[in-house]
């Protein structure tokens, strides 16, 4: 059965059943938020259709509409709104308008740190006190997304949340990469950094692109790569299986075909990681994640 208006759903992958009784064949179309993309409608019994979405939905209020058309053109419409509230921990689910709880407050706090959200006046004050994701929070998310080259839709999806909450610190002296989540150490990895002749730059950067199984291309105007040819994905690719470029030319965080180099200053400026480590980190951060190299 469809949820009652304002019903609460505790999963990001809800499944609804629509019962249709008609003496003629019918067509059933469903939309979420006015969009049919990703919505899957499947007949599971003679009079029952199952409605799901092929991607996880963010926490917040969603609008479900079902339109049934019979063989002679009669149309029946049903509308329901429902709230997804599946977790209290920021980062476990996306967040959108209507979301509530501690995860919303944590999001507002990091937006405040990013100087795009004010909890002291207007709608921001009410949303902060009520731990609600309303117009002020959505506006702050859109502003941050626009500043970081993302689609400014006002929904704090996985890329936005990771960009806001995850931070990478690379310590060249200790050959470590530390991943912080909301200011706390989440995980530390061992890395290789640049040699004296080709040093890794110091400073504050961000991830600007990501690639799975990248092709290594000789950097232009680099004497050490003169005459080298591109190397396709595979066991002999010096980038390993993952690449994350940062906002400085020809420098990135990547895997390696030489794991013995980890822990030393031997690269041509990039940050090397063991294959299991780069694959683990790759799935935890997004384009826009801050990278500080010290």
Image (spheres, rainbow, N blue to C red):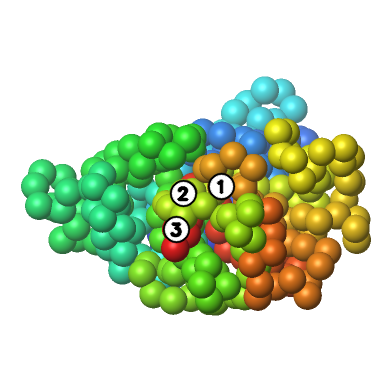
Is label 1 in a helix, a strand or a loop?
strand
Q: Taking 265 as reference, is 214 left or right?
A: right
The answer to which of marks 1 and 3 sits earlier in the sequence is 1
Whether residue 179 is visible, yes or no, is: no
Residue at figure coordinates x 43%, y 53% from the top left: 203
The answer to which of marks 2 and 1 sits earlier in the sequence is 2
Q: CA distance from mark 1 to mark 3?
A: 10 Å
**Residue 85: horizontal and vertical position, in percent?**
42, 64
Q: Locate residue 131: give its quadrant.
A: bottom left
Q: CA distance from mark 2 to mark 1?
A: 6 Å
Q: Locate residue 13: give its quadrant.
A: bottom right
Is label 3 in a helix, a strand or a loop?
strand
Query: Which residue lies under the disc numbered 2?
Result: 205
Residue at figure coordinates x 77%, y 36% from the top left: 25
Instruction: Please say if 258 is above or below 121.
Output: below
Query: Which residue lies under the disc numbered 3?
Result: 292
Query: Which residue lies under the disc numbered 1?
Result: 246
Whether the residues at callouts 2 and 3 have beta carbons within 8 Å, the answer is yes
Give the label on residue 257, or none.
none
């Amino acid at each position: 059965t469809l949820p009652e208006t304002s019903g609460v759903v505790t999963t990001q992958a809800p499944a609804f059943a629509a019962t249709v009784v008609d003496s003629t064949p019918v067509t059933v179309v469903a939309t979420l938020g006015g969009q049919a993309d990703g919505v899957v409608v499947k007949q599971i019994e003679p009079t029952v259709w199952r409605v799901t979405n092929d991607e996880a939905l963010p926490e917040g209020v969603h609008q479900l509409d079902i339109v049934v058309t019979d063989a002679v053109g009669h149309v029946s419409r049903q509308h329901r709104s429902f709230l997804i509230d599946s977790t209290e921990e920021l980062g476990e689910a996306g967040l959108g308008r209507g979301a509530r709880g501690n995860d919303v407050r944590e999001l507002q706090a990091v937006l405040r740190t990013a100087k795009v959200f004010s909890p002291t006046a207007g709608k921001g004050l009410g949303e902060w006190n009520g731990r609600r994701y309303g117009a002020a929070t959505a506006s702050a998310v859109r502003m941050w997304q626009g500043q970081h080259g993302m689609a400014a839709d006002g929904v704090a999806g996985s890329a936005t949340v990771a960009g806001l909450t995850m931070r990478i610190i690379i310590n060249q002296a200790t050959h470590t990469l530390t991943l912080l989540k909301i200011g706390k150490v989440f995980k530390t990895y061992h890395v290789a950094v640049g040699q004296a002749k080709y040093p890794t730059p110091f400073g504050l950067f961000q991830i600007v692109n990501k690639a799975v199984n990248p092709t290594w291309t000789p950097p232009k105007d680099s004497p050490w790569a003169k005459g080298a040819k591109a190397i396709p994905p595979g066991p002999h690719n010096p980038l390993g299986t993952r690449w994350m470029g940062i906002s400085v030319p020809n420098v990135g965080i990547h895997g390696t075909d030489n794991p013995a180099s980890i822990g030393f200053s031997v690269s041509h400026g990039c940050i090397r990681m063991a294959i299991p480590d780069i694959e683990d980190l790759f799935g935890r951060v997004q384009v826009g994640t801050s990278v500080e190299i010290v």
